[in-house]
Amino acid sequence: MGGLGAPATVDVIGRGLRCRCPRCGRANLFDGFLKVTERCAACGLGFGGHDAGDGPAVFIVLVVGAVVTGLALLTEIALAPPLWVHALLWTPLIVAFSLAGLRPLKGVTVALQYKFRSVEEPAEPGGQ
C-alpha cells in the first residue's frame, strides 16, 4: 500500500467513508457539505468525471425509512403514544440520520467510481 499505486477496494471504501481522497487518503473529498472538490489538494487527482448522482440519497431514504418505521411500529405497539409524540420523536431522528449518512455514502460512491472507472475518462461520462 505504498506510493500512489491502486489501493485495495477496502481501503478505497474506508477513505470514502472518512470523506477523504480515494487515491491518497490525505485530503478532503468535499468542498462544503456535499460539493465534491475539483481536485485533491494532496495528490492532484481530479474528480471531474465522478458524479454520485442520487444513489446515496435513495439508499439513505430506504434505510432510514425502514429503521424509523420499525422503531415507530415497536413504539406504537409497546406504548401507544399520541401522534404528536411520534412526530416529536421521529422527525428529528429522520433528519439527523439522513444528514449524518449522506456525506459518507456520497464519499463511498465517488471512491468506488475512482476504483472501478478510469480517471482519464471525459469529464462527462459518455461525452467527447
Image: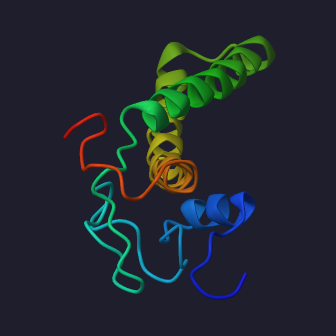
In the drawing, does residue 48 fall left or right of residue 14? left
- The residue drawn where x is 34% and y is 83% is 41
* Quadrant placement of the C terminus: top left
Camera-nearest residue between 7 and 75: 7
Q: How many discs appear?
A: 0
Camera-nearest residue between 121 and 37: 121
Report the residue that reaches farthest toward the front. 128
Camera-nearest residue between 79 and 41: 41
Q: Is residue 117 above or below residue 87?
A: below
Report the residue that reaches farthest toward the right. 78
* Quadrant placement of the N terminus: bottom right
- The residue drawn where x is 57% and y is 23% is 62
Image quadrant where residue 18 sits: bottom right
Q: How far from the left and from the top, in percent, is residue 87?
A: 47, 24
Q: How far from the left and from the top, in percent, is residue 104?
A: 52, 55
Q: How far from the left and from the top, in percent, is residue 24?
A: 54, 79
Colour scheme: rainbow
- The residue drawn where x is 32% and y is 67% is 46
Q: Is residue 29 above or below residue 120?
A: below
In the drawing, does residue 62 fall left or right of residue 76? left
Q: Is residue 37 above or below residue 102?
A: below
Report the residue that reaches farthest toward the left. 128
